[in-house]
Image: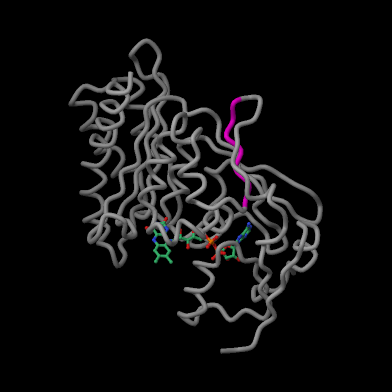
Amino acid sequence: MTPFEFLLPYSLDEALSLLDPEDPNIRPVGGGTAVMLMMKAGVLHPTRLISLQKIGDEHASVGVNTEGDLVIGGLARLADIECHAAVRKDWPLLSQALRGVANARVRAVATIGGNLRHADPHLDMPPVLAALSARVVITGPKGSRTVNAEDLCTGYYETVVERDELITQVTVPPQAGPGHYLKLTTRAAHDWPALGLAVVLKMVHGQVEKAHFFTGAATDRPTRLVQAQTLIEQRGFEPDALRAAGEAAVHEAPLMGDAHGSAEYKSQLLKTALPRAIDIALRRSRSHA
Ligand SMILES: Cc1cc2nc3c(=O)[nH]c(=O)nc-3n(C[C@H](O)[C@H](O)[C@H](O)COP(=O)(O)OP(=O)(O)OC[C@H]3O[C@@H](n4cnc5c(N)ncnc54)[C@H](O)[C@@H]3O)c2cc1C
C-alpha cells in the first residue's frame, strides 16, 4: 500500500483548508466504509485522508427546525437518523429505507455526507431523498450553497460537489404524504439493489395531487419518472392507470444492466415495482390513519 497522511482536523474550516481542488488523491473521510473498500479494491490510492470525525458535534446532529424541516448534519450517522424519534414518526419513508441499507454495523459508522458524495448508482438513499424533495448544503472555501437532492448526482460516482467542498447538511421538508421505498435485490434483502424505487404521494381529499417517483440502481443516477408521475396524477390509482404507469416508467428510464441483472431484467422489475410500491404506500398510510 502506498503510504498516506491521515489528518484529524478540529473544525470545518481546518478540514476545508486541507482539501485540494486539483488532487483526486486527497479525500475527506466520514465513516470510511466506502473509502476503505475502494482502497482495498485498489481503485483509490490516497496521498492524504482527512477525517471529519472531530470537526464538531453540531455537524453530526439530527433535529427539526422551526419550519418543521428535518435538519441532518453532514456527519450524522445513518443509524442515528434511522433511530431518531422525529424521523420514525414524521418521516416514515426515511426510516423505512434506512433500515434496509447494508447492515447495522455499516449504518452505525456510515455518514449521510459520505453516502451522498459516494454516488454509487446503487445507493438507496439518493432516490429516497430526491423523492422527499430534500436539499443538500455544500460548503467550500467560498461559503455554502444548496442544491436539490434530485440534482446532486450527475453520473456514475459523480456529483456536483467539488474536490475542495464538503456536504455539511441535508434538509428534508415534511413528508408530503404516503411513501415507500422498494428495494429489489437478487440475494439477501439488505444487499445492494438491482432496482430501487422511491415513491411519495401528496394526497388531497383522497386524490393524488402530486406524485414523486425516483428510480435508482438501474440507472446511473437517481432518475425522476416524469411520465409515470403525470399518468398517476391525471388518472389516479385505478388498476389500468397503475399498469400504464409501470409501462411508462420502463420507456422513459435509461435502464442499464450490471452485475445485479440485465437492462431487460430490470425493466421487468420496474414495470411491476411501480404499482407495487404505490399500493404498499397507500395501504400503509391507511393502516396508520
Ligand atoms: C458491506 C457493505 C454493504 C453495503 N450495502 C449497501 C446497501 O445495501 N445500500 C446502500 O445504499 N449502501 C450500501 N453500502 C454503502 C454505504 O452506504 C456507504 O459505504 C456509506 O454510506 C458511505 O458513507 P461513509 O460515511 O462511510 O463514506 P466514506 O467512505 O467516508 O466516504 C465516501 C466518499 O465520500 C467522500 N466524503 C465523505 N464524507 C464527505 C462529506 N461530508 N462531504 C463530501 N465528501 C465526503 C469521501 O472522500 C469518499 O469519496 C454498503 C457498504 C458496505 C461496506
Image coordinates for residue 131, horizontal then vertical, percent: 45, 37
Residue 118 image position (x, y, % from top left):
53, 61
**Magenta stretch holds residue 139:** no
Q: For the N terminus, which image quadrant?
A: bottom right
Q: What residue lies at 40% left-to-right and 31% top-to-bottom?
A: 200
In the rendered view of the protein, which quadrant contains the C terminus? top left
Residue 96 spot, x, y in % from top left: 37, 41
- The range drawn in magenta is 68-74
Give residue 59's position: percent from left, percent from top: 67, 50
Judge whether 165 appears above or below 7 on screen.
above
Say which residue appears at 27% left-offset and 33% top-offset: 245
Question: Horizontally, is 58 left or right of 71 in the view?
Answer: right
244 displayed left or right of 218: left
- Furthest-left residue in view? 239
Viewed as shown, does residue 151 lie left or right of 137? left
- In which image quadrant can residue 141 be found? bottom right
Q: Is residue 72 magenta?
A: yes
